Image: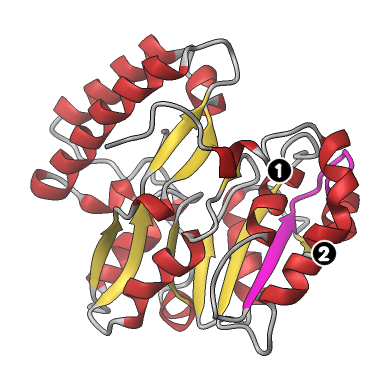
Amino acid sequence: MRPIAIPANIQEHNQPNEALLAGLDTIRAGFQRLLKSTPEVSVVMPAYNEEASILKTLSCLSQSVTQRSVEIIVVDNNSKDNTEAIVNSTGARCIKETKQGITPARNAGLAAAKGKYILNADADTLYPPHWIEEMVKPLDRNDITSVYGRFSFIPTAGTNRLVYFFYEYAADFMRWINKKFREEAVNAYGFNSGFKREQGLQVEGFNHPPGANEDGWLALKLRNKGFGKLYYVTSPKALVWTTDRRIQMDGGLLKGFKKRIKRIVTKKAEIRHDL
């Protein structure tokens, strides 16, 4: 059962910067607690002009519950706003990537990461406390090379949350079609997926051909290299909440839904990842 309302443990972080800045000491303490020793898990997040949202994301991640040692890496991709200053104020690690674009940013994060496992995150997404642990557990298996998870939408432009509740079930059906009949790798999104770092380096990271997107193409490369299967994490404890800004960029929910339906029924299975 998908949630109709945004849960309290997500809403407490879905606050304006002014409210969250009062809790900076708690956020810093959370990241210090997570990084127990040499990191086993690296959560890598590209960011470009994300001052309005990234503190929410970092606040969530600082409250993660896991016994693993975790580092948080934000890749500042030439932000012109206060993104870098906000990240530094939380104690998360911030690195710079001057080559513009999501693929160079993700590759820079991969190169800088020290963890055995990489989890891909985004600066407009909120993560529940057990997300890291639930996403990493399948990667402990030798036959699993990459994981991807479930998500729900946080409305930003007036769309009723109940509308998205039903839309998400339709999207689940589309992902099932991809897995069973088309290409499962298109289900891997850069804000909610993971892989083993050494395997990612062996396939040249997020590099991809024109017409493909970096996140699904990496999952495809890992599987086709023979490293193992893809794994869909369905635990309610791992459900992440992302804003609907990509849908709004598509012209709204109706236009975005038509676009995704068209992609499903076309014969060519593209490795693309608009939400």
Q: Quadrant of the C terminus?
A: top left
- 61 on left or right of 226: right
Q: Quadrant of the N terminus?
A: top left
- Position of residue 116 measured from the top left corner of the image (x, y, whole percent): 51, 83
Q: Amino acid at mark 1?
A: Lys
Q: Residue at x 15, y 26 (%)?
A: 265
Residue at far left of view: 181
The residue wearing badge 2 is 28
Comparing 175 with 151, the one in front is 151
Count of marks placed on residues? 2
- Position of residue 234 measured from the top left corner of the image (x, y, whole percent): 29, 53
Residue 126: name its quadrant: top right
Magenta residues span 70-83
Residue at far front of view: 8
Q: Earlier in the sequence, mark 1 or mark 2?
A: 2
Q: Amino acid at mark 2?
A: Arg
Say if mark 1 contacts mark 2, CB within 8 Å.
no
Disc 1 versus disc 2: distance between alpha carbons? 13 Å
Q: Residue at x 67, y 35 (%)?
A: 14
- Position of residue 153 measured from the top left corner of the image (x, y, whole percent): 47, 30
Q: Residue at x 39, y 26 (%)?
A: 4
Residue 254: name its quadrant: top left
The residue wearing badge 1 is 56
Is 137 included in the stretch rendered in magenta? Answer: no
Q: Is residue 233 above or below residue 30?
A: above
- 42 on left or right of 29: left
Dot 2: element = helix
